[in-house]
Image (tube, rainbow, N blue to C red):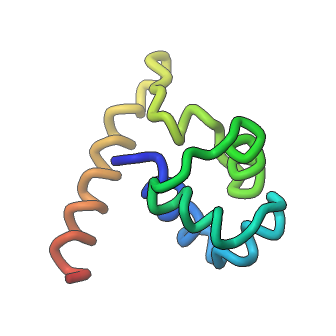
Amino acid sequence: MDIGSKIRDLREDADLSQKEISAMIPMNQSNYSKIERNVQEPSLFQLKRIAEILHIDLNKLFEIEDKSDPYTKDIIFARKIKKLYEDTYND
């Protein structure tokens, strides 16, 4: 999954609109939309702000796994099941 899609999914999970999150960064909503659509690369500052707003670690955005976490495989499996369900039933 690409970074824009991850950001979009996390934003939607947090129940925030593009307009709300772009105002908190701050940046233009149109440019924020481009990030979610992978048309524009976010700056490091924008990535940091997005992670802070969504209360996530940047490692989550880049899928950097913590090999010391015994539940990492379970979390990845659960995410794949969720995506499969969404792809199957949200069409």
Q: Quadrant of the C terminus?
A: bottom left
- Which percent across, then down, holds residue 51? 69, 47
In the picture, measured across the screen, residue 5 lies left or right of residue 16, that is: left
In the picture, measured across the screen, residue 68 lies left or right of residue 11, that is: left
Q: Nearer the viewer, residue 14 or 32?
A: 32
Q: Nearer the viewer, residue 85 or 36?
A: 36
At horizontal 45% and vertical 62% (from top left) the residue drawn is: 37
Above or below — where is 20 with respect to 51?
A: below
- Which percent across, then down, holds residue 44? 71, 36
Above or below — where is 23 with respect to 40?
A: below
Above or below — where is 40 with respect to 13?
A: above
At horizontal 64% and vertical 71% (from top left) the residue drawn is: 30
At horizontal 83% and vertical 64% (from top left) the residue drawn is: 24
- Which percent across, then down, holds residue 87? 21, 70
**Total marks in image:** 0
At horizontal 48% and vertical 27% (from top left) the residue drawn is: 64
Above or below — where is 31 with respect to 80?
A: below
- Which percent across, then down, holds residue 4? 48, 54
Q: Residue furthest left?
A: 88
In the picture, measured across the screen, residue 10 lies left or right of residue 26, that is: left
Which quadrant of the view contains residue 38? Answer: bottom left
